[in-house]
Image: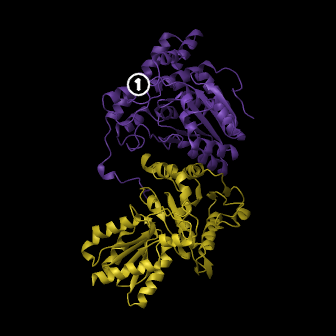
Chain colours: A purple, B yellow
Amino acid sequence: MTHRTPPTGSPAVPEAAGHLLRQMLRVRRLEEQCVELYSAARIRGFLHVYIGEEAVAAGVMSALGPEDAVVATYREHGHALLRGVSAGVILAEMYGHVQGCCRGRGGSMHLFDAATHFYGGNAIVAGGLPLAVGMALADRMAGRARVTACFFGEGAAAEGEFHESLNLAALWRLPVLFCCENNLYAMGTALARSQSQTDLALKAAAYELPAWSVDGMDVLAVEESARRAVDAVRAGGGPHFLELRTYRFRAHSMFDPERYRDKAEVARWTERDPILSLRRSLEATGRFSEDDWNALDREVAAEMEAAVRFAEAGAPEPLDDLQRFVYSER
Amino acid sequence: METTYREAMRTAIREALLQDDRVFLMGEDVGAYGGCFAVSLGLFEEFGPERVRDTPLSESAFVGAGIGAALNGMRPIVEIMTVNFSLLALDQIVNNAATLLHMSGGQFNVPLVIRMTTGAGRQLGAQHSHSLEGWFAHVPGLRILTPATVEDARGMLWTALEDPDPVLIFEHGSLYNLSGELAEDAGPVDIHAAAVRREGGDVSLITYGGTLPLTLEAADRLAAEGIEAEVLDLRTLRPLDDAAILATVVKTHRAVVVDEGWRSGSLSAEISARITESAFYELDAPVARVCSAEVPIPYARDLELAALPSAERVVAAAREAVGGGG
């Protein structure tokens, strides 16, 4: 049975909302730090920031358990951070330092972390979906009640691997949570200009798996939908699909002049800033004050300052180690 | 005991399924059908649909799923029906299997075995007959095996499964009916070293996989003419056994590389280059190559045979090398 919208439940408690606000702000400040460091040429390569989309990662990650696995895309700094990789280790990776989570071999697009079951950092669009299916297959065969959450953009729905993977996961009823971050643009190509069916939950539902569209700017809605989906997947309900409708406030990457969308559209979406929205609704309850916000902001700023210091203090891997990790060291 | 390459491969898969719960076989028609080339015949009935797992025609998804399962504790054997179909999974093999360990700074290895048939000779036309193993041998992070004997068909799989990194096994379609003697206690073999299949001092014939039988036939014919050829079976295309290649060239001073791949940008070109890089002053004749004609492999029998390496062409190349160096 498929659902077009998630079933409703009890509202999240304020403490949980406070946690989600904090998590979203951590991602926002990390990304702002990345942009600043990129402009200062401390970070090179491609850099894709998640500003505007924070509610998606914050809501979904909050619904996962520590043993669950995450497969993400090349716009994954926030996912790594919220999965538990420290901001310092993430920034050190972008600096190309050996203190980074991948010893500087991955960079911004390829963050991996075994300790938190974070499997990238995949920069081929839709390339992570088959991996997630296989990880879930292994969990099923081994009898582990683990969920693999797989993030990808709406652009992935045009790739064959999307269709092959949804079919395989549904056919074998594997414990995968497919999280489609629909920010409306595949780099610069609008969804309506590239896919004949723009209703992605409907597209996914064709593979006979529950598929829900969720307001990806509302972190409470994301968290609730994700929790219900994760619970269902873990209970043996087979793969679930969330289309998280969101928007990227910044350019695709640092090289993007944004010729493909107009400023009015961006302005309309930034009015729905997920962090600002949650802050306002918390303030409206009377249980969260401007002082509370300022304290939170200072705390997060201090975390990021420490992270930059950690990354700055690192060093590149010795060139003699170039050939390591092509094959396993036995 | 007398056995065939196909049976030896099946015995190896069966043994792996029996010995390690983490092993499973996955691919198109490996189960209920018994395998396109009947390699897995009977295993579905013995081990059931979970461990001998039929997949949809989704090469990228099931190869990628093999990578994911390998990352997550399993030891999958993924079968791709032919090397031509593997191109549909090239993204997963090259961008994921081969890179994850390095990109992750050593955190995530991929203990996956991918088996596929390769090669021509059965009138299957251009989309089922190519020899693209040389392409895969280009890619760091992969190990490329080409069993050419019943011993290697029996023994390479288990060693490959014990390897912590992705291993691709190329089974030449013309070898499945190859029969040979196999010891009752035959078991795992090394997957590192090339093997001298015939000793000789006049010329080195360097080959692998499906062209080993015709190269041995050529060596027999050359012997009848008084030319003693040494036949080196590379066995592993990546990493190449440079020491073995160098040793035979130092011994005979003449080399003919026999490779069913196309000549341009090929494995034969790589071997030739390595010989000239490391043993140029040992050579008494230019390195020769016998490769497939630079055409998509045609269907018609005579045209197909004309496109492929043959014992006659190997004999001619060896004669030229020996005579030319006189």
Which structural element holds mark 1? helix
| Picture quarter with the N terminus of chain A | top right
Graded by Cα atoms within 10 Å as few (under 14), some (14 to 19) or many (20 or more), the crowding at tag 1 reads some
Q: Which residue is situated farthest in the right direction here?
A: A1
- Residue A114 position, x and y percent, is 50, 44
Question: Residue B318 lies in what quarter of the image?
Answer: bottom left
Numbered disc 1: what chain?
A: A
Residue A48 visible in the picture: yes
Using the image as rendered, state which of residue A312 and residue B111 is in the foreground: B111
Q: Residue at x 61, y 31 (%)?
A: A63
Residue B15, position in %: x, y?
Answer: 63, 68
Q: Quadrant of residue B259?
A: bottom left
Q: Position of residue A194 (x, y in %)?
A: 55, 33
Q: With respect to residue A22, does A186 lie above or below? A: below
Residue at coordinates 59% horizontally, 28% vertically from top-left? A244
Q: What residue sits right under mark 1 in the picture?
A: A32
Front position in the image: B116 or B45: B116
Figure disc tally: 1
Eyeballing the image, is A161 above or below B283? above
Q: Is residue A179 left or right of residue A312?
A: right
Name which residue lies at 67% across and 56% down. B53
In the displayed orientation, state which residue is furthest to the left.
B281
Query: Which quadrant holds the C terminus of chain A?
Result: bottom left
